[in-house]
Image: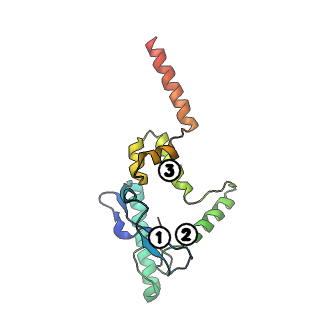
Amino acid sequence: MLALKWNDVNYEKGALRVTKTLYNPSNNITKYQLLSPKTVGSIRTIRIDDRLVKMLKRHEIQQKEMKLQYGSVYVDNQFIFARNDGHPQLRKVVEIRLKRLLKKAGITKNITPHSFRHTHTSLLIEAGVGVKEIQNRLGHTDINTTMNIYAHMTSNMEEKASHQFSKLMKDLL
């Protein structure tokens, strides 16, 4: 997420292109590297819906206003998730803000930004999205990676499977 740049967004096609990762172990705003993802399969295009397209367009307008406000201080490297000075946002800042929001909401579970990837995947599975589509969306080269990590069924899916089987048996009798 932190490595995404505006040229990775295609508003017309409703797509985001994932081509790099942000490596910044020292959490220094100027000492980062943009690296290739772990695998070739990690480079991918992800479809996004109209709602997210609209949100990104609004965010881009706000960011352009920020650039004007900060003038020559703003380092414009085209990061979508930039700090007010244009440098890429630090992962640590995202983690700290998330912890603060969780605390404010009274949520004691340890949730990290990466947790949202797992939640997204679980919701896709529950919505009936195929494993192959999920594999492509997550950028897994090997479908077994997807299956091993995400093939668990939610309780809702188990209940749905039970009802569907029951209905099938009832219709057969």
Precedes in sequence: disc 2 or disc 3? 2
Q: How many marks?
A: 3
Residue at position x 49%, y 23% from top? 165
Q: Are marks 1 and 2 in contact (CB under 8 Å)?
A: yes
Along the line of sight, the residue nearer the viewer: 31 or 84: 31
**Amino acid tagged 2:** Arg
Can residue 49 be spotted in the picture? yes
Provide the residue designation for mark 1.
22
Residue at position x 56%, y 55% from top? 115
**Amino acid tagged 1:** Leu
Precedes in sequence: disc 3 or disc 1? 1
Instruction: Note whether 75 is above or below 163 in the view shown.
Output: below
Residue at position x 37%, y 64% from top? 19
Provide the residue designation for mark 3.
120
From the viewer's perspective, is the residue at label 1 or at label 2 nearer?
Answer: 1
* Quadrant position of residue 77: bottom left
Provide the residue designation for mark 2.
91
Task: Give the CA distance from mark 2 to mark 3.
Answer: 19 Å
**Amino acid tagged 3:** His
* Quadrant position of residue 91: bottom right
Q: Are marks 2 and 3 in contact (CB under 8 Å)?
A: no
